[in-house]
């Protein structure tokens, strides 16, 4: 009945993964065989943190705001997930500074990355909105006899039993890489507050110089409404692996703070306590939400 009891879930080095997206053989290839190159750019996130938004922004930056790529090739091919099905096939389509995505925690990442100079962009979102977004995505999976309740998903999230494990461990593991260079930390909330400033920061990190009108086009074509309408960004291509599993849209509301419509006061207080305990080693001012 619960997510972690479903047959497609498996535990790998302490992390729950879903074989529908990450078959064991793909994971082993990603970790042990895939060669990360110095000029690769890898977007990393915990699921439901704004990954697809960032894919769109990056693809548009690569094309200086020109939308032909984002309008003709599905997002999961433009920036393929390292650990997922078809990665080897999709990554062959790229050369030069390759763009790829991953939800893997740092200890499951390709070993070759740790001796490379590849750039990592790590996006973080308020975990309360992450779990809210996740709830809406998985609640209506066809295989559930009854729709999932929010408290069930919240419980799984808190226990680290959703795919890719604990949000806290994911963030704590990756955030340490800040000190190593070639690492950009960005928050979903920062994008919401100042998307132009965030895009300029990303351009600077990538060494890309875009003119103001090119940035305008990046912003326009990566907006929630543009992505929602773009068949290459909203998972309405016939061959995609997502809508075979999820019936809810990947692009839902695209706002910050919707968690307030889902958490009870008791859940919110318990979550605050857990957050403080788990993240006590980090400066609370780092996180742009209250
Ligand atoms: P909501 O469910 O809260 O709407 P991911 O891509 O990591 O799976 O994250 C999905 C979340 O990012 C969803 O959140 C989705 O709506 C939101 N999102 C996607 N594109 C966006 C955009 N252009 N602007 C704002 N939010 C966006």
Image: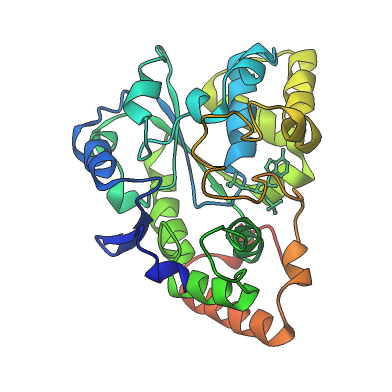
- Taking depth in this image into account, of 75 and 116 the one nearest to the observer is 75
Q: Quadrant of residue 17?
A: bottom left
178 on left or right of 111: right
**Is 121 above or below relative to 124?**
above
Task: Spot the residue most to the bottom.
Answer: 266
Q: Position of residue 31 (x, y in %)?
A: 24, 41
- Taking depth in this image into account, of 71 and 144 the one nearest to the observer is 144
The residue at the point 29 percent across, 30 percent down is 116
20 on left or right of 187: left
- Taking depth in this image into account, of 205 and 94 the one nearest to the observer is 94
The residue at the point 75 percent across, 45 percent down is 192
Q: Position of residue 261 (x, y in %)?
A: 78, 70
**Is 149 above or below relative to 238?**
below
Give the position of the C terminus as an image quadrant. bottom right
Q: Quadrant of residue 152?
A: bottom right
Task: Spot the residue most to the left.
Answer: 32
The residue at the point 19 percent across, 32 percent down is 33
Q: Position of residue 39 (x, y in %)?
A: 38, 20
Q: How is the structure coloured here?
A: rainbow
The residue at the point 78 percent across, 46 percent down is 193
Q: Position of residue 285 (x, y in %)?
A: 63, 62
- Regarding residue 26, the answer to whether it shows in the image is yes
Q: How many marks?
A: 0
- Taking depth in this image into account, of 12 and 172 the one nearest to the observer is 12
């Amino acid at each position: 009945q619960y997510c972690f009891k479903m047959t497609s879930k498996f535990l790998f080095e302490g992390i729950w993964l879903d074989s529908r997206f990450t078959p064991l053989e793909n994971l082993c290839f990603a970790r042990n065989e895939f060669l990360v190159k110095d000029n690769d750019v890898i977007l990393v996130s915990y699921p439901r943190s704004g990954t697809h938004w960032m894919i769109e922004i990056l693809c548009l930056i690569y094309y200086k705001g020109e939308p032909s790529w984002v309008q003709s090739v599905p997002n999961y091919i433009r920036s393929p997930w390292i650990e997922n099905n078809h990665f080897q096939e999709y990554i062959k389509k790229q050369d030069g500074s390759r763009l790829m995505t991953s939800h893997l925690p740092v200890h499951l990442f390709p070993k070759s990355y740790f001796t490379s100079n590849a750039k990592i962009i790590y996006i973080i979102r308020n975990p309360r909105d992450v779990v809210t977004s996740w709830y809406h995505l998985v609640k209506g999976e066809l295989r559930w006899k009854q729709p999932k309740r929010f408290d069930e998903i919240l419980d799984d999230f808190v226990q680290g039993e959703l795919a890719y494990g604990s949000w806290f461990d994911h963030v704590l593991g990756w955030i340490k890489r800040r000190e190593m260079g070639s690492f950009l930390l960005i928050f979903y909330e920062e994008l919401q507050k100042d998307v132009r400033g965030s895009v300029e920061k990303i351009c600077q990190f990538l060494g890309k110089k875009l003119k103001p009108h090119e940035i305008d086009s990046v912003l326009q074509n990566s907006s929630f409404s543009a992505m929602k309408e773009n068949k290459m960004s909203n998972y309405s291509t016939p061959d995609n692996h997502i809508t075979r599993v999820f019936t809810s849209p990947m692009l839902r509301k695209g706002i910050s703070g919707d968690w307030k419509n889902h958490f009870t006061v008791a859940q919110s207080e318990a979550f605050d306590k857990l957050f403080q305990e788990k993240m006590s080693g980090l400066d609370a001012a780092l996180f742009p939400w209250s």
